[in-house]
Image (cartoon, rainbow, N blue to C red):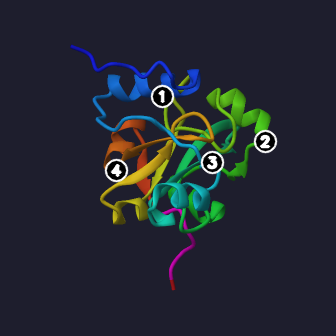
Amino acid sequence: MAPQQDTSLPVRSMQVARALAAAGIAGQVRELAASTRTAAEAASALGCEVGAIANSLVFISDDEPVLVLTSGRHKVDTTALAARWGRGELRRATPDQVRQATGQAIGGVAPVGHPRALPTVVDEALTDYSQVWAAAGTPRTVFPTTANELVQLTGALLLPVGPVGP
């Protein structure tokens, strides 16, 4: 029997919950009272380290949208990541491009639930945490997961996304 869907969730979050269930991911989408729009807000609302927040960032590379799921503890080094990934220049998508590519607004972009799957990278730094939290389609919804589940869920490559070390 399929798990019961929480029909009180926003429509975008229900799409994410369906995608998670279809992929066999156990984590349930939760709606929080506090905003989770930024990694710092999400970590505060969830009582976890900021590094355990999986930020969903949309970039444009080689004329197509791509998704980078990065640890909230650092910024993406776009030049280094493009080279590691074997892609052209990565430039931040505009809010309109993000919504067009994902159907979701900045601050609530989930790893899934998009009109079509996006080429995706999961930040290796997320493997430092036994549980990470990702947005679930709105700025107030999240779900628990792991770096390995994110790779499985999105068909992502696991790569370092931060600056090159010393």
* Disc with the residue nearer the chain's start (2 vs 4): 2
Give the total of numbered labels.
Answer: 4
CB-based contact (under 8 Å), mark 2 and mark 3: no
Query: For the residue carrying disc 2, how many other residues have a C-alpha within 10 Å: few (<14), some (14-19), or many (20+)?
Result: few
Q: Which mark is residue 16?
A: 1
The picture quadrant where one finds residue 23 is: top left
Looking at the rendered image, the disc whose residue lies closer to the viewer, 1 or 3, is: 3
Q: CA distance from mark 1 to mark 3?
A: 18 Å
**C-alpha distance separating marks 1 and 2:** 22 Å
Part of the protein shown in magenta:
160-165
Residue tagged 4: 146
Query: Can you tell which quarter of the image residue 79 is in?
Result: bottom right
Looking at the rendered structure, the kind of residue marked 2 is Thr
Counting from the top left corner in percent of width and height, residue 143 is at: 43, 41
Q: Determine the residue located farthest toward the top in the rendered image.
A: 1
Instruction: Look at the image and tell me whether residue 115 can be seen.
Output: no
Place of residue 161 in the rendered image (x, y in percent of width and height, measured from the top left): 53, 62
User: How far, Cα to Cα, is label 2 from label 3?
Assistant: 21 Å
Report the residue marked by disc 2: 94
* Residue sitting nearer the eye, 32 or 103: 32
Q: Which is in the foreground here, disc 1 or disc 2? A: 1
Q: Residue at x 58, y 58 (%)?
A: 39
Earlier-in-chain disc, 4 versus 1: 1
Q: Residues within 10 Å of mark 1 (few under 14, many from 20)?
A: many
Q: Are marks 1 and 3 in contact (CB under 8 Å)?
A: no
Q: Label 3: which residue? A: 35
